[in-house]
């Protein structure tokens, strides 16, 4: 089959799956998940055919052998083209995104309790559903649409089609985060799924408006949104780089890059628009894995990697304010998210703040110009974060089964209610341990070490010493809270009856964990620095870097930094140090009961409270934005403006004209209608009175005449006599 045709077809099966399930298969669970799983497997196979065809062809420097487009929208004498393409960059995404999606779909079948017997014990906060996931078919329909949107975004050859996939994913995140819309919680601080969905949708929309302005500004300046036509047009890039924008100190390229980056701040949950991502955990765990690994937040990082030539343009001609802003936000977010994660107890929320932190690493890397390191960490992070989220779902599932067995009402996501799961859920334990070590950057044997070390090495080599220090602290905290999570969950004795009765899940949930564990270890070896002793040469002198730079014009390709041992030693030290401290605090002496006070809470005191409450950013946003918006909507807009002013004016005008109409009617009756009516009444009375004279007999008429003459004569006589 033609490879170019395959690129067009890659997103199609999941999109068709969405339509088939919604229209025809929504009443049959087995058919629904079979259609969905088959569709993503087809996309995965087609993606890998295209990817390995590209690898075999080995194209570089902007060559684009797999490219196809159609004339979509006439723009006068030209057309706005819409097409697909595969180059050195998105071929990497086509390698790991479909694989993660297939793993998530297979995992979802077991997670949704397909084929399990019903029971009468439902989880607290959920409507009665007897253990069978409600709206099962709808879930796979939405998940299919989510996958199709991400694949559309990945193969797009222009920014507009990328934005279409981007926005469809925003819709899917709303539908899937709020999927369990019937859930309610007794805890007033807890966010119900339907509120979390609205929060995610509105927060990301704020950023997307700015991104859309950036797209419009780019089109107004370039006349095209095609990546290749912009990046490899030297004259155009020179104009974008050197022409000033309407903001002082920013070139056109700087301002476009900043507007587009704001879209990433929302989509990839960077400070200050990070608040939606932790609450996105209210969706089913497969949704969390899709958002954090295979789609959504990965799309945000991919977009700024894709637009790197625009974002970085001008850096060689002087300070690049956009790159400086990106570096600051990324480094700050990496540390910010890591500090919050150390004080969380929800097993998924810890991973959510971990994702925020790791995305900060990638953003900071791009701000420093570490194009290869950011992309490398994006790939490895997708593998081990999908593994960790599905592992957390497996843990929750196991504890929920224990709850069903003993009829205990606890929060199955609170790590304080766990403990001792290592022996009860061995596959989940070992795979989660591998994912946790990869996240921590355990040296030499995990993918996370090689990608995170690449970022630290790049920061050190290019003299970003403050960023290097901040990221080292964040990396230490990452290893620490990861070991804390592993210890609280798996080590020690069970702290609840539910944990004591937890057991391993079926193969549809554990097989994806095993597959992703393989990539969480071995995916990193393709990006080992070429100068790294022994391993650099053994694994091909960094084939990942040699492949990826081919997506950039020659004059923009980053130069490999010189290998030095110091960042490697620091990377090893912070990873092992964090793991050791986490184990000494939580692993060597595990909590004995669910209500035991966290040992670090005693040490940090008020600081712990602040971290546990996420620096009160949500409370600040509620006071500064949500509450005023409610007041504006309910009081100012509705009661004062709508009811008071607009309705008041309308009611006054209506009352005035009503009264005027009543007055006019009275005037009409007295002055206009009354005289003619009275005259008509007189004529009518005269006619009624005179009708008796009209007898039709001549004798009567003669008599009336004689009488009349006599009366006239008498009257005349009186007048003469007088």
Image (tube, grey):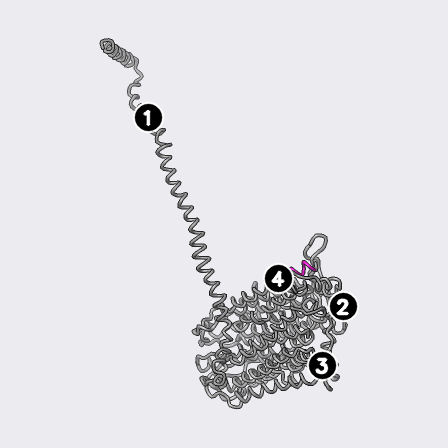
Give the total number of marks visible in the rendering: 4
Which residue is label 4 attached to? 212
Crowd band around label 2 with a 10 angstrom C-alpha radius: few (<14), some (14–19), many (20+): some
Magenta region's main secondary structure? helix
| Magenta-drawn segment | 216-221
Distance from the alpha carbon under mark 3 to that under mark 2: 25 Å
Q: Position of residue 243 (x, y in %)?
A: 70, 61
Badge 1 or badge 3: first in the primary sequence = 3
Q: Position of residue 198 (x, y in %)?
A: 51, 66
Label placed on residue 684: 1
Badge 3 or badge 4: first in the primary sequence = 4
Q: Position of residue 13 (x, y in %)?
A: 64, 67
Depicted 575 relative to depicted 671: above or below: below
Q: Secondary structure at mark 1?
A: helix
Q: Secondary structure at mark 3?
A: loop
Which residue is label 3 attached to? 529
């Amino acid at each position: 089959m033609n490879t170019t045709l395959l690129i067009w077809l890659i997103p199609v099966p999941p999109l068709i799956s969405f339509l088939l399930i919604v229209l025809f298969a929504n009443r049959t669970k087995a058919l629904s998940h079979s259609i969905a799983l088959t569709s993503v497997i087809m996309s995965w196979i087609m993606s890998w055919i295209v990817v390995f065809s590209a690898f075999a062809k080995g194209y570089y420097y902007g060559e684009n052998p797999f490219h196809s487009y159609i004339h979509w929208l006439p723009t006068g004498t030209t057309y706005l083209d819409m097409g697909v393409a595969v180059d050195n960059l998105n071929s990497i995404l086509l390698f790991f995104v479909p694989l993660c999606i297939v793993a998530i779909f297979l995992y979802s079948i077991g997670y949704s309790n397909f084929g399990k017997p019903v029971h009468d014990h439902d989880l607290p906060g959920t409507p009665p559903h007897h253990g069978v996931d409600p709206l099962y078919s709808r879930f796979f329909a939405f998940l299919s649409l989510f996958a199709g949107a991400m694949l559309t975004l990945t193969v797009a050859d222009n920014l507009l089609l990328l934005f279409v996939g981007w926005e469809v994913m925003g819709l899917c995140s709303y539908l899937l985060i709020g999927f369990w819309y019937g859930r309610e919680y007794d805890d007033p601080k807890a966010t119900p799924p339907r509120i979390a969905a609205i929060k995610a949708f509105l927060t990301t929309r704020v950023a997307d408006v700015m991104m859309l302005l950036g797209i419009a500004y780019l089109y107004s300046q370039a006349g095209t949104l095609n990546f290749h036509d912009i990046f490899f047009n030297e004259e155009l890039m020179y104009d974008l780089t050197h022409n000033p924008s309407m903001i002082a100190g920013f070139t056109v390229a700087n301002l476009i890059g900043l507007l587009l980056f704001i879209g990433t701040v929302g989509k990839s949950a960077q400070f200050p628009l990070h608040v939606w991502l932790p609450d996105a955990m209210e969706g089913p765990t497969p949704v969390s894995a899709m958002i954090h690994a295979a789609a959504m937040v990965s799309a945000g990082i991919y977009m700024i990697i894709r637009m790197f030539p625009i974002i970085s343009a001008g850096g060689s001609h002087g300070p690049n304010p956009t790159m400086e802003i990106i570096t600051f936000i990324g480094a700050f977010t990496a540390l910010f998210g890591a500090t919050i994660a150390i004080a969380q107890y929800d097993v998924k929320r810890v991973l959510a703040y971990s994702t925020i932190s790791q995305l900060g690493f990638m953003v900071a890397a791009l701000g420093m110009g570490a194009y290869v390191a950011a992309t490398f960490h994006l790939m490895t992070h997708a593998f081990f974060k999908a593994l960790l989220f599905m592992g957390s779902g497996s843990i929750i599932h196991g504890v929920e089964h224990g709850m069903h067995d003993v009829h205990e009402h606890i929060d199955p996501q609170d790590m304080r209610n766990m403990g001792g799961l290592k022996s009860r859920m061995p596959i989940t334990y070992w795979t989660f341990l591998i994912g946790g070590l990869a996240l921590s950057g355990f040296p030499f044997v995990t993918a996370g070490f090689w990608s995170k070390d690449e970022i630290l090495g790049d920061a050190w080599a290019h003299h970003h010493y403050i960023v290097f220090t901040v990221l080292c602290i964040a990396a230490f905290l990452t290893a620490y809270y990861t070991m804390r999570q592993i210890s609280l969950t798996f080590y020690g004795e069970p702290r609840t009856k539910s944990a004591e009765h937890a057991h391993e899940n079926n193969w549809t949930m554990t097989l994806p964990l095993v597959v992703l564990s393989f990539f969480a270890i071995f995916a990193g070896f393709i990006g080992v620095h070429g100068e790294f002793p022994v391993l650099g040469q053994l694994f091909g002198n960094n084939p990942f870097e040699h492949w990826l730079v081919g997506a950039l014009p020659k004059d923009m390709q980053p130069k490999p930094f010189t290998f030095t041992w110091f960042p490697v030693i620091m990377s090893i030290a912070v990873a092992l140090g964090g793991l050791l401290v986490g184990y000494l605090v939580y692993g060597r002496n595990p909590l004995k009961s669910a209500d035991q006070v966290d040992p670090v809470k005693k040490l940090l005191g008020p600081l712990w409270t602040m971290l546990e409450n996420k620096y009160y950013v949500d409370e600040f946003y509620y006071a500064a934005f949500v509450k005023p918006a409610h007041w504006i909507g309910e009081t100012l807009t509705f009661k004062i403006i709508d009811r008071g002013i607009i309705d008041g004016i309308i009611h006054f005008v209506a009352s005035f004209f009503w009264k005027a109409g009543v007055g006019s009617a009275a005037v009409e009756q007295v002055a206009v209608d009354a005289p003619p009516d009275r005259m008509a009444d007189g004529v009518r009375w005269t006619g009624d009175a005179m009708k008796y004279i009209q007898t039709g007999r001549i004798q009567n008429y003669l008599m009336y005449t004689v009488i009349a003459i006599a009366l006239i004569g008498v009257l005349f006589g009186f007048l003469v006599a007088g």
